[in-house]
Image (spheres, rainbow, N blue to C red):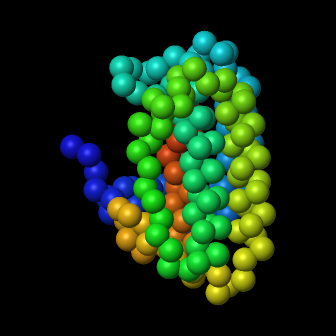
């Protein structure tokens, strides 16, 4: 059974607990870099089980998600209250051939997009952190909420990658 939008938010926020989302996001690139540097290309491409993403696919997903997050932040800043489209990560994975992606190139893209998004977040005024958009599935989401979801999403996938690489 697929989790609801609210269950997803609760699960992702659970990874975050009381940690600073910007500190987590700032540390993610180095953590991913360390994990990827220790693994062979074949290990990065190996699916842990049928229908589960490989590390390579997770890295491609993280890079694409960072593009989406960046767009959402900028759309909200430009037009508070704007609609935020959802995306189907599995359809994206298939359409963009995540399984064939170069894991190190995906990591490079993630790092570049993440840096741009962190630079933007660090430049915001306290009032701008409260600006929100209307997510198609999850309802009203402020920039602050998006930053927290992004940090929790990082922690979720770092744990997933660590588990895969330990097998």
Residue 112 location (% of width, % of height): 76, 46
Residue extending furthest toward the bottom? 127
Q: Residue at x 50, y 46 (%)?
A: 156
Q: Position of 96 compared to 30: left or right?
A: left
Q: Position of residue 162 (x, y in %)?
A: 56, 32
Compared to 157, does 114 lie above or below? below
Name the quadrant containing residue 98. Answer: top right
| Residue 84 x/y as whole percent | 48, 65
Question: In front here: 66 or 155?
Answer: 66
Going 47% across and 38% down the picture, which residue do you hit?
Answer: 92
Residue positioned most to the left: 1
Q: Position of residue 87 (x, y in %)?
A: 44, 50
The image quarter containing residue 52 is: top left
**Quarter occupied by residue 115:** bottom right
| As drawn, 26 above or below 33 | below
Name the quadrant of the N terminus. top left
Where 120 falls versus 46 (above or below)?
below
Q: Is residue 23 left or right of residue 98?
A: right
Residue at 67% x, 15% y is 40
Q: Nearer the viewer, residue 144 or 160?
A: 144
Q: Residue at x 63, y 42 (%)?
A: 63
Residue 88 seen by the camera: yes
For the image, the number of numbered tags is 0
Q: Is residue 95 above or below residue 43?
A: below
- The answer, for residue 31, to whether it is visible in the render is no
């Amino acid at each position: 059974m697929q989790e609801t939008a609210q269950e997803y938010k609760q699960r992702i926020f659970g990874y975050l607990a009381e940690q600073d989302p910007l500190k987590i996001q700032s540390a993610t690139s180095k953590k991913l870099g360390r994990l990827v540097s220790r693994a062979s290309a074949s290990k990065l491409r190996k699916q842990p089980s049928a229908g589960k993403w490989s590390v390579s696919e997770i890295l491609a997903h993280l890079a694409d998600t960072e593009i989406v997050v960046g767009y959402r932040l900028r759309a909200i800043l430009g037009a508070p209250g704007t609609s935020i489209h959802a995306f189907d990560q599995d359809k994206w994975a298939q359409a963009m051939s995540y399984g064939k992606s170069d894991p190190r190139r995906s990591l490079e893209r993630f790092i570049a997009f993440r840096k741009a998004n962190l630079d933007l977040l660090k430049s915001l005024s306290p009032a701008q952190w409260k600006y929100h958009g209307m997510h198609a599935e999850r309802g009203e989401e402020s920039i602050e909420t998006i930053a927290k979801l992004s940090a929790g999403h990082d922690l979720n996938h770092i744990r997933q990658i660590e588990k895969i690489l330990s097998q």
